[in-house]
Image (cartoon, grey):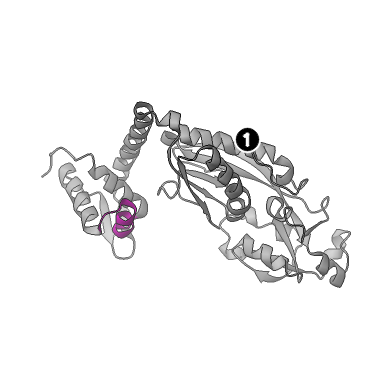
Amino acid sequence: MPGARPDWDDLRYFLEVARTQRVSVAAQRLGVDHTTVSRRVRALEQALGTLLFDKSRNAGFALTPEGQQLQVYAEQMEGTLQSACEQVAGWGQTLSGHVRIGSTEAFGTYFLTPLLSRFQRQYPSIQLDILPVPRFVSLSKREADLAITIERPRRGPYVCSKLCDYRLQLYATPAYLASHGAIERLGDLKGRRFISYVDELTFSKELRYLEDIVPGGDVVLRSTSVIAQYHAALQGEALAILPCFMAAQDPRLVPLLVDEVVVARSFWIYCHEELRTLKRITTLWDYLREAALRNEALLQGRAGELRHA
């Protein structure tokens, strides 16, 4: 009934539905059945005397203005509780817990995963989820605790810092150069075949660089996945612009026109404000910054081997 004291545990169910917009997905993440989630959300709405979600078959559970306001306070409470548990239970000393990291596809696969495998050797009680995906990971929906992306977030309750600069270069296989001729100057790119992104499906303008290098270039294969582009380039039929931290580690690819074709980008690391004080987050954050600094040569294409922190 309206005016009753809310059950604090109901807020956990509310937050999962707010983040996933689906009762079934929230139930899966909470390890309960969907009827339990629906019941707890209804109980919270009744206790507060207000509607928290607009429900539709197509859009799922969308927050009402009251629900959006409650989410802000609930997330602050969640962060405060996590920090308190670390202090009281001594988690800060044992560095245990779970961290989910979202990143761009190639960086997560070829840079983060090898480094974080070593990180777990040092901190075996920290459980890690790595999400290398060709899109932006949503921290507002709690898809991840930490995000590494090629664009700095413009707004939101986040702590954000530049992680590193990196470079992309033009690559080909030795077999391609042997069969199609050497490339020694920009003019040699005329008439060549290229591999690139599907322009209208790129998740960031930062990925649209081929047109700047080779206006009107003959793109014969497109993919939303840079890893797919990398494997296509290995077939020796076309050229591709690829991140150095990925391609420079593969001796089957040769960088071309390293002084003429220069594509420079940056990675940003960020998380919710209330998570930044958690010691497992702080430790991982500092580890990644040290690893990026240690591998500056690889990120810039001057080295071909990943150095572990």
Secondary structure beneath disc 1?
helix
- Looking at the image, residue 150 sits to the left or right of residue 47; the answer is right
Residue 278 screen position, x and y as percent: 44, 33
The residue to which callout 1 is attached is 290
Query: Looking at this rendering, what residue extends furthest in the left direction?
Result: 1
- What residue type is disc 1 on? Glu
Badge count: 1
Instruction: In the rendered view, tell whether residue 185 sits above or below residue 97.
Output: below
Taking the magenta stretch, the answer to whether it contains residue 114 is no
Residue 224 screen position, x and y as percent: 59, 64
Give me the residue at 31% from left, 39% from top. 74
Taking the magenta stretch, the answer to whether it contains residue 27 is yes
Q: Is 42 or 52 nearer to us in this picture?
A: 42
Q: Is 45 or 90 nearer to us in this picture?
A: 90
Residue 97 screen position, x and y as percent: 42, 40
- Looking at the image, residue 64 sits to the left or right of residue 151; the answer is left
Give me the residue at 55% from left, 41% from top. 121
**From this viewpoint, is residue 201 visible?**
yes
The part of the chain drawn in magenta is 21-33
The quadrant in which the N terminus is found is top left
Q: Is 269 or 51 nearer to us in this picture?
A: 269
The quadrant in which the C terminus is found is top right
State which quadrant residue 49 falls in.
top left
